Image: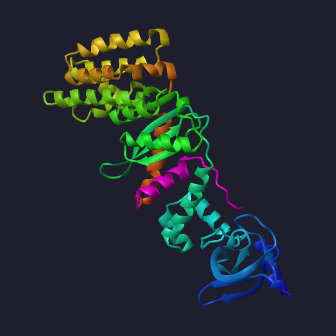
Amino acid sequence: MPSPTEELFSRALGLEEPWQVIEIEFSEADQEINIYLDFPRGSRFRCPKCGREDVPAYDTKEKRWRHLNFFQHRAYLHCPVPRVDCPDCGIKSVELPWARPGSGFTLLFEALIMALAREMPVKALSRLIDEHDTRIWRVIQHYVAEARRKEVYLDVDKVGIDETSRKRGHHYVTLFVDLDQSKVIFAAEGKDSGTIGRFSNDFHDHGGDLDTVREVCCDMSPAFIDGVEHCLPNARITFDRFHVMKIMGDAVDKVRREEQRECKELKRSRYIWLKNPENLTAGQRRQLEQLSQRNLKTARAYQIRLNLRDFWDQPLPEAEDYLKRWYFWATHSRLEPIKEAAYTIKRHWDGVVNFVKSKITNGILEGINSLVQAARNKARGYRSVEYFITMIYMIAGKLKFSLPT
């Protein structure tokens, strides 16, 4: 007969027959509470593989799990885990209601880990709960992988592709985003065409149909273009307008840097020419007006950039004619960086014009990238690319985790 204290702990743990608390030990020196569980002799269990009921125990193996703290004290559950001798499946360890197979934590403790991992770096979490970060990563990776296995991409038809850096140097992870749901559906190391192939395999594994992907938004990376053309045959590419405008912004800045050798007033004016007029401060606006009164190449390059910006708002019938007129102006500007930028746009003409039809951009990806980089900086980087990708899914995958409450 269990004591009132043991009965209380059995209820608090949510135990059901045949499980029961048989002993509780508190160590003041170690600041630990140890709760011992057991089952009555002769209890029968369910086979974890085939589901056969009323199978007798074959033997037991003693195990321990970290549980939620009891006030400020670490709590552990101890139990002899029975193995059953199933006539059909052989000897198997039974499933336990408080822990998943192979874990050293209870389900509730893992739920706490997952809740905290969304809010703080794993290193900080490991110090908070006094567990090695490798054990915490195993828990996170398990639930992320389990949640991703349940994902179905049958209705995904618009995909955004962009890379994000995982550490200094040329170390990248490519993100694939469902633009309708604003969530990462795949992440892969690198930024070559092979990442598109890995995405297509994963997409197929999750019930997606590559033929139904109609729109892809990406930058002008030859690797991305080649990968999309080979793996997503029915997808129409739209080149991200922010990437196109960045090409023009870089061209304007090249003109400025060349001209400032003769015009010293252009020094420290870089961001004036890269910003849109409505985003300038009062001081920057005055400086722009003063410089624009002079016959500067940079001012001409800036006007060409602003006119390209107006292309994105053109109605469909007039959009391509507008871009043709802009292209003629840019290529006859006698500004070499501007001409090179215009030639780049010409080489990717269809993908640029497609924006007017698809109206899709990687703005969603830019927002996700900001979240990812903020998490990376907060964690001061991740020890491996696998950890980095796991955290991307955690914070930007909108996954549904099966966690106890």
Q: Is residue 404 above or below residue 321?
A: below
Q: Is residue 56 visible?
A: yes
Residue 73 appears in the picture as rendered: no
Q: Is residue 94 left or right of residue 337?
A: right
Left or right of residue 367, residue 384 in this image: left
Residue furthest to the right: 1
The structure residue drawn at horizontal position 39% and vertical position 9%, both measured from the top left corner, is: 321
158 shown above or below 35: above
Where does the image place residue 10, in percent across and percent down from the top left?
79, 77
In percent of the image, x 47 and y 66: which residue is there?
Answer: 123
Residue 261 spot, x, y in % from top left: 14, 30
**Is 174 part of what is drawn in magenta?**
no
- Residue 143: image quadrant is bottom right
Image x and y of residue 272, in percent: 32, 30
Residue at screen point 60% across, 70% down = 103
Q: Nearer the viewer, residue 402 or 241?
A: 402
Left or right: residue 189 compared with residue 169: right
Residue range highlighted in magenta: 383-405
On the rendered image, what quadrant is the C terminus found in?
A: bottom right
In the figure, is residue 156 to the left or right of 366?
right
Vertical order, 58 against 381 (above or below): below
Residue 402 falls inside the magenta stretch: yes
Image x and y of residue 186, in percent: 50, 45
Instruction: From the viewer's side, name the closer residue of 363 and 352.
Output: 352
In the rendered image, the quadrant that contains the N terminus is bottom right
Q: Residue furthest front?
A: 87
Describe the colour scheme in one phrase.
rainbow
Q: Of residues 31 and 40, which is closer to you in this image?
A: 40
Residue at 51% x, 71% y is: 127
